[in-house]
Image: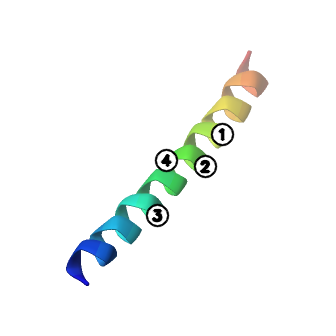
Amino acid sequence: MRKIRRKQMAERRLERIKKLQKEARKAARKNN
């Protein structure tokens, strides 16, 4: 169970990072 939970946390972290990268790209486009 612990491994599964850790995997879920890692996946959630990846999703958050992807979302942040998308937002950063949009912001960069606006600034440029």
Question: N-terminal of the two: label 1 or label 3?
Answer: 3
Q: Amino acid at mark 1?
A: Lys
Question: N-terminal of the two: label 3 or label 2?
Answer: 3
Category of crowding for the residue at label 4, using alpha-carbon neighbours closer than 10 angstroms: few (below 14), some (14–19), many (at least 20): few
Q: Amino acid at mark 3?
A: Arg
**Which residue is label 1 attached to?**
22
Residue 5 as seen in the image, left or right of residue 16: left
Tell which residue pokes out farthest to the left in this image: 2
**Which residue is label 3 attached to?**
12
Q: Position of residue 28 (x, y in %)?
A: 67, 25
- Numbered mark located on residue 19 in the image: 2
Whether residues under marks 1 and 3 lie with C-beta atoms below 8 angstroms apart, the answer is: no
Residue 1 as seen in the image, left or right of residue 10: left
Q: Amino acid at mark 4?
A: Ile
**Which residue is label 4 attached to?**
17
Secondary structure under tag 2 reads: helix
Secondary structure under tag 1 reads: helix
Secondary structure under tag 3 reads: helix
- Position of the N terminus, as image quadrant, is bottom left
Q: Position of residue 5 (x, y in %)?
A: 31, 77
Q: Position of residue 13 (x, y in %)?
A: 42, 58
Secondary structure under tag 4 reads: helix
> Compared to 11, does 26 lie above or below?
above
Category of crowding for the residue at label 3, using alpha-carbon neighbours closer than 10 angstroms: few (below 14), some (14–19), many (at least 20): few
Whether residues under marks 2 and 4 lie with C-beta atoms below 8 angstroms apart, the answer is: yes
